[in-house]
Structure formats: structure tokens, C-alpha cells
Image (spheres, helix red, strand yellow):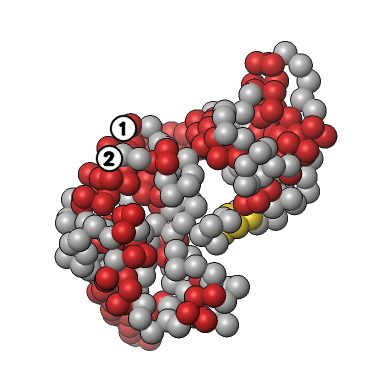
Amino acid sequence: MSLNYRIVLLAVATTAALAAAPAQAVTAQDLLAGYVKTTGAPANPVAGQAFFTEKHGKDWSCATCHSANPAGAGKHATTGKAITALAPAGDAARFTDLAKTEKWFKRNCNDVVGRECSASEKANVLAWLLTVK
Amino acid sequence: MLINRHNFLVSCFGALALALAALTGAAHADGNKAPPPAAYLQECGSCHAPFPAKMLPSASWRAVMTSLDKHYGTDASIDAPAAQALTQWLTASPSNKVSVRPPQDRVTKSTYFLRKHSEVSAAAWARPSIKSAVNCTACHTRAAEGSYSEREIVIPK
């Protein structure tokens, strides 16, 4: 083989190898498993739906902005800004980044519940969101 | 020969398109020279449209960025390094439009904002499709990307 051909072959092989190498993709199921592991108890999607749609002594429920049917788009209660679907069935990017998920749980639970949500509450809510189509 | 002429015309069109894109890019900025960084769109453009940095004086931005846990009734806190980086971007070029801190440091309460929106009637603000002055994306069709060019405005019924 000529030198040029070998260089091209090497370039193609490297590109193929890089493209084939799987990224460390986190799925919503991974996140759910993490929360379940923390609680040591199975997630309860029925409780999750109730938690999501009820108010917790303050003005908003999760559903206020994220919709009682979170497979569809939501809307910010004050600003009117469109919010993409929260359920992974409606937006495949949801719950694929632990840091982002934790950040939003922290803020939004503070607003809705007045405190941080427990791992059990997060597990229940996420388990329910995974059933919503 | 025909193929050469075709290629030449395509190249010309391409160059022209690029030039136009560059020009409109600068013009779109509406006083800001570049679109906001991705971090700003993500952190400050989720619950409301990402407001242009020029809409508040630096003192207002600093006040907002140091009280994110009590952000107009919600918890909008972010980690300290991110807050610092965003504050730096927000205050990098002091606003030439708003020099006085508006009431409650609200973007929608500056004399500049009020003047720019003076043609919007109270009835228009109250339309269900708009509801509030902070609902930029209702009329500014590219506000979610940080663009508020007058050419992009579509006022809904």
C-alpha cells in the first residue's frame, strides 16, 4: 500500500473508532434507579402522580407549570414562557443529566413544597413521569 | 462551459449569502454585538425569556444575581461559579439604555422599557395570548434565543 493510502486508512479508522465509542449516556431509568437505591424501597408511581398534581400548602403544584399531563408542553404560571414536556415520552432529553435534574428538583421543590424533596418523593415522581405517554 | 458558469454563480450567491448573514447578525444584536452565551440561555432563559443585558444597569444585575434564591417569588439559585460567570457577562458592557435602577430591579419597569412599549395598549397586555409584560416570547418571536429585533415582532390577537 502506498503511504497516502495508509494515511487515509488510518484517518478513516480513527474516525470510525471515535464515532463508535459510546458516550456515557445517562438514561431516565438510571436516574430513577439511583433514587430508588437511596431510599431502599421501590418507587410508587401512583404516589408520584398525587404528589405532582397536589398543592403542598403553597400556591403552586408541579402541575401548575408542568401540566397535569406532562407528556405535553407546560407554561410558566407567572411569565407565560413555554416549557417543554417534562415526561421523557414528550421530551427525550429529560432526566438524562443528574446535575441538571438535582438542580431543578432543589429549586422547584423549594417553590412548591417549601423544602427539598426527599429521594423517595423524587423516585415516585420520576417513576410516574416514565409512565406518562 | 455551462458547468463552470453554474459553479461561478453558486459561489457568488454563497459569498453574498454569507455577507448578508454577517451583516444581519450584527444588526440583529440590537445594540449587543453577539447572542448571549449558552449558559445564559439555559440558566436565565428557562422560566422567562433571556433578557438582553442592556435592559438593566449593572447595579440591578448585581442585586438580582446575589438574590437568586428569592427571585421575584421563586428560587432561581445556581451554583456560585456559574453565578459569577453570568454576572461578569451581564455587567461586561454597562447598559447605554438604562442607567437608573428600575423599581424592584424589574426589566419591565425601566423608563426605557416603558418607552419602547408605549404603543402597546393595556387591553393588548391583558390578552390571554400575552397576559404580562414579562412574557416577551408572546410577541418577540425569537426572544428565547435572546433576539428582540423589531423585525421579528408578531403581536398575537
In the image, residue A10 above or below residue A62 = above
Q: Are marks 2 and 1 in contact (CB under 8 Å)?
A: yes
Please tell me whether residue B49 is drawn above or below residue B85 in the rendered image: below
How far from the left and from the top, in percent, is residue A127? Answer: 74, 33
Quarter location, residue B108: bottom left
Asked where in the image residue A7 lies, by quadrant, the reply is top left
As shown in the figure, which amino acid type bears the numbered disc 1?
Pro
Quadrant of the snapshot with the N terminus of chain B = bottom left
Q: In this picture, is B58 found above or below A32?
A: below
Dot 2 and dot 1 within a common chain: yes
Which residue sits at x=66%, y=38%?
A: A57
Q: Which residue is at a point 80% across and 28% down the rendered structure image?
A: A44
Residue in the foreground of this view, choosing between B76 and B29: B76
Left or right of B124 in this view: A26: right
Under circle 2, the secondary element is helix
On residue B81, which mark appears? 1
- Few, some or many C-alpha atoms within 10 Å of disc 2 (few <14, some 14-19, many ≥20)? few
Alpha-carbon span between mark 2 and mark 1: 6 Å
Amino acid at dot 2: Ala
Label number found at residue A33 = none
Q: Chain of mark 1?
A: B
Say which residue label 2 marks: B85
Give the residue at the far right of this rendering: A46
x and y, in percent, of residue B80 in the image: 33, 31
Residue B36 visible in the picture: no
Residue depicted at 55% across the width and 62% down the height: A80
Q: Quadrant of the C terminus of chain B?
A: bottom right
